[in-house]
């Protein structure tokens, strides 16, 4: 323990020196390059045109009017993407010149009194919207959705269930099999993530975070920070299922470790505390992702990602391996030794990359939209898929999708 404490103290001292140096030098940063190259600063305008279907309000605006809480939950990207596209320079009102077609449906805007989304009506809502556009416009039928995209930000995307086993049993809504899905859920080799999907960050309120920014020269005096559930006894009374046991392992092994500031309490200084921390734990919960990832990046706290096989937001544009630390779920008991063994130079480089404004901006859905934000990263992802391949457009009379596939309950009218 003593050796690890000394190592942590050395890291904290180096982090303090980094903060001081950055303050003096004007926050010099490094360029960011993902697997698709140096594309984080790309401007999508002129690279694609998007047609936005005009759907009846029951699919979107009336749902929001009924429950305005939908604007503030972590699935709100479905709402803000719609608003953004309506005024975006990439929007075209001529569907004949469109590269992509967007169907504005808010499948998660059906909340319980406690604010949790109920996905049970979502498949019927989505089927109804697709049937409408396929009947009213000719563009769905010529590709069966292969040049269409949908925002499906629920826990397990277009599988439309909050419990993984049931989501896997349902699978992705059959009518969406050819469409591009823009979703927060991402896990390799999982039935709820189809090839070609664009994985995005969950919504976290930009203005709220902006209001809690502290001085950039504040020392990072906390080594490891986490606030959140370790157990979910209401939904997982026997334990071991929630977070696949990873959060419980964190608590059981490190609740008394002086290097770890972890608790279920959510103090009013939560955002400020993240800005005072070197590492911020981002473990899986019911799904692999959570808003903590966004918060960590925005506040320059190195995200410690504990979620095996996770597919992270904009993975072809953001070098997650360079800015974060990945710890396998089975290695959580060694978390202290893993973090204290990271060379100081590596930690300082991660902090320099996190200090790049483009990195922070890519994780946010600001109102109004700003250059390089998450909206633009989504459009850049769509632009990189162009031109559409020959397999996108069907031959006259050709059909691929099975309109009667899926659970019987999903076939009922919405």
Image (cartoon, helix red, strand yellow):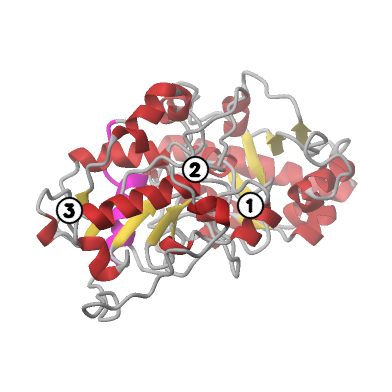
> On the rendered structure, is 77 left or right of 117?
left
Residue 23 is one of the magenta-drawn residues: no
Q: Nearer the viewer, residue 308 or 144?
A: 144
Q: Nearer the viewer, residue 255 or 187?
A: 187
Query: Which disc is residue 288 wearing?
Result: 1
How far apart are the alpha carbons under marks 2 and 3? 24 Å
How far apart are the alpha carbons under marks 2 and 1? 12 Å
Q: Nearer the viewer, residue 276 or 159?
A: 159
Q: x, y percentage for residue 266?
A: 68, 24
Query: Which disc is residue 45 wearing?
Result: 3
Q: Earlier in the sequence, mark 2 or mark 1?
A: 2
Residue at screen point 49% across, 49% down: 412
How far apart are the alpha carbons under marks 1 and 3? 32 Å
Graded by Cα atoms within 10 Å as few (under 14), some (14 to 19) or many (20 or more), the crowding at tag 3 reads some
Q: Nearer the viewer, residue 38 or 200?
A: 200
> On the rendered structure, is 101 left or right of 179?
left
Is label 2 in contact with label 1 (beta carbons under 8 Å)?
no
Pointer 2 residue: 202
Q: Earlier in the sequence, mark 2 or mark 3?
A: 3
> On the rendered structure, is 248 left or right of 91?
right
Is label 2 in contact with label 3 (beta carbons under 8 Å)?
no
> On the rendered structure, is 292 left or right of 378?
right
Q: Secondary structure at mark 3?
A: loop
Above or below, comparing residue 361 to residue 316 in the picture: above
Q: Is residue 26 in sight in this rendering?
A: no
Residue 373 is one of the magenta-drawn residues: yes
Q: Is residue 183 in sight in this rendering?
A: yes
Q: Quadrant of the C terminus?
A: top left
Q: x, y percentage for residue 37?
A: 35, 68
- For the record, the magenta segment spans 368-385
């Amino acid at each position: 323990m003593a050796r690890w404490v000394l190592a942590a103290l050395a890291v904290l001292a180096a982090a303090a020196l980094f903060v001081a140096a950055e303050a003096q030098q004007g926050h010099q940063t490094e360029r960011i390059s993902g697997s698709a190259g140096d594309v984080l600063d790309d401007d999508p305008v002129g690279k694609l045109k998007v047609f936005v279907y005009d759907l009846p309000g029951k699919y979107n605006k009336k749902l929001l009017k009924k429950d305005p809480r939908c604007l503030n939950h972590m699935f709100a990207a479905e709402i803000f993407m719609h608003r953004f596209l309506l005024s975006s320079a990439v929007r075209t009102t001529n569907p004949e010149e469109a590269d992509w077609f967007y169907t504005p449906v808010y499948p998660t805007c059906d909340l319980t009194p406690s604010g949790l989304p109920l996905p049970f009506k979502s498949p019927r809502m989505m089927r109804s919207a697709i049937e409408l556009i396929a009947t009213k416009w000719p563009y769905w039928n010529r590709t069966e959705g292969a040049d269409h995209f949908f925002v499906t930000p629920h826990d397990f995307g277009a599988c439309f269930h909050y419990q993984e086993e049931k989501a896997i049993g349902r699978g992705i809504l059959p009518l969406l099999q050819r469409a591009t899905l823009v979703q927060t859920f991402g896990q390799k080799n999982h039935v709820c993530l189809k090839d070609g999907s664009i994985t995005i960050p969950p919504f976290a309120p930009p203005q709220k975070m902006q209001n809690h920014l502290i001085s950039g020269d504040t020392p990072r005096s906390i080594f490891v920070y986490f606030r959140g559930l370790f157990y979910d006894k209401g939904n997982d009374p026997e334990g071991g299922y929630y977070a696949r046991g990873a959060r419980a392992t964190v608590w059981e092994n490190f609740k008394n470790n002086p290097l770890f500031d972890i608790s279920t309490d959510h103090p009013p200084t939560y955002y400020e505390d993240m800005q005072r921390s070197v590492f911020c734990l981002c473990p899986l919960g019911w799904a692999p992702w959570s808003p903590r990832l966004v918060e960590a990046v925005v506040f320059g706290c190195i995200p410690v990602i504990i979620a095996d096989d996770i597919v992270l937001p904009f993975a072809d544009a953001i070098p997650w391996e360079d800015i974060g630390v990945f710890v396998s779920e089975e290695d959580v008991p060694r978390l202290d030794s893993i973090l204290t063994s990271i060379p100081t130079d590596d930690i300082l480089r991660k902090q320099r990359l996190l200090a790049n404004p483009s990195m922070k901006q890519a994780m946010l859905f600001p109102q109004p939209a700003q250059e390089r934000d998450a909206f633009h990263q989504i459009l850049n992802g769509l632009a990189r898929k162009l031109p559409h391949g020959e397999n996108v457009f069907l031959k006259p009379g050709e059909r691929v999708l099975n309109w009667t596939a899926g659970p019987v309950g999903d076939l009922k009218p919405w």
